[in-house]
Image: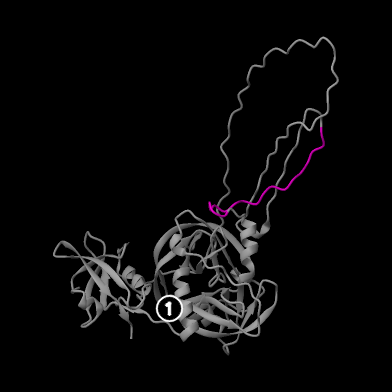
Amino acid sequence: MNANEPHEQGTGGWSQFGATPPAAGGFPRRDTIAMEQPPPPPPPSAPVKPRLTTGQKAVAGLALAAMAIGGGVVGAAVATAFQPQPQQVVSAPSPKLRQASNQLSTAEVAERVQPSVVMIQGQTGEGSGVVLSEDGLILTNNHVVVGAAQGGGQMTVKFSDGKTAKATVVGTDPPTDLAVIRAQDVSGLTKADLGDSDQLKVGDDVLAIGSPLGLDGSVTRGIISALNRTLNLGGEQRQQLPPGFGGEQQQSPVQGTTIGDVIQTDAAINPGNSGGALVNAAGQLVGINTAIASDAAGGGVGFAIPVNTAKQVAEQLIKNGKVSHAFLGVSVTDATGDVPGALIRQVTAGSPAAKAGLKEGDLITKIGDTPVDSGDTVVGQVRGFKPGQQVKITYMRDGQSAEATVTLQEKK
């Protein structure tokens, strides 16, 4: 396997299908302990007419958030005082997304972000996109553009207010499965607020917003369940149309690719979410939803391309119409021994790897701070670097650990 080429897929691979709602949970039961009451005090010498006051109020609220957050919340409160009072009903607050610096409710985050997420439609496929500029630049997945543009290359963008516009391709980058398109004759769009995916932590709350199964503006809630995953996208993407859309499941050829440093989330992602937004608790874009790994018998795990990678790719596509990728110059395979890593099978003469002293038979165990457990990890990591960037590679040779600093070149 070449570290600069896609890794061939087996019979497994990533699937864009299948999600089973989680089973309902419950709360532990607690027994009530009856406390012995003290004897009542003696009556006052003279009756005193009780005074009406506002009293003390006990308020209880219950908020239920469904997987599709757009359903809203339900709340209730009961007010009591020393004198009987009418029952009062108040709205319970929307659940909070956890972020110390900016506590926004789920509904507030969704309301803030939805105008910057669009639905992309074509004759044989559909997906989602994120607005980058007020004049119509939109970031999405390469496989969304390929599917939607089939049959004449016409695409339509549908905005959150129901308006539509024709769209054309600005540039695509199959190795990272990213693309930029432009909606025609539009202005004043709400562009996404770009966050910093390097600041994400496992357990952070996130929302996925897009158009799963043609249901535009859908919002699902979850957490970051893992970071720095290596994602293999096969050479074929499939779009399954919801009932009533007409037509059978469509297949469109897409170049297979391997992507490193991918975000894993348990927020529900389905066909049509691809290219949509993964946002943090402040409503900032932290990832572009891309794929789901699923078992045919149950739910799946979603994956998103980090926004820091997407931003870098989008800037080059907008400026040049193409992306420059880094070149290491090794062919690798998975290690078979007790030590996990990527075994170098071949080093290209004159390549950055050769100049750094790497040799055939070396076992790469770490790139930068990222442990290497397979050849795919090397491929994904190299694709996330820039030409000219210096990278520390840790490897083993003759049973001894060593390090090499490689200055990556542009892939020709």
Residue 157 falls within the magenta-colored stretch:
no
Q: Position of residue 350 (x, y in %)?
A: 21, 83
Q: How is the image coloured?
A: one colour
Residue pictured at 69% horizontal, 47% vertical: 92
In the picture, measured across the screen, residue 100 lies left or right of residue 73, that is left
Q: Position of residue 312 (x, y in %)?
A: 45, 75
Residue most extreme to the bottom: 152
Relative depth, front residue between 186 and 251: 186
10 Å crowding of disc 1: few (<14), some (14-19), many (20+) = some
Q: Position of residue 28 (x, y in %)?
A: 56, 37
Q: Position of residue 320 (x, y in %)?
A: 46, 86
Identify the image quadrant of residue 182: bottom right
| Start-end of magenta stretch | 85-102
Relative depth, front residue between 237 and 396: 396
**Tag count:** 1
Residue pictured at 66% horizontal, 74% vertical: 159
Q: Is residue 321 above or below residue 138?
A: below
By secondary structure, the bulk of the magenta-drawn segment is best described as loop
Residue 95 falls within the magenta-colored stretch:
yes
For badge 1, the amino acid type reads Gly
Residue pictured at 54% horizontal, 85% vertical: 169
Relative depth, front residue between 13 and 314: 314
Relative depth, front residue between 295 and 258: 258
Residue pictured at 49% horizontal, 61% vertical: 300
Identify residue for label 1: 235
Residue 142 visible = no
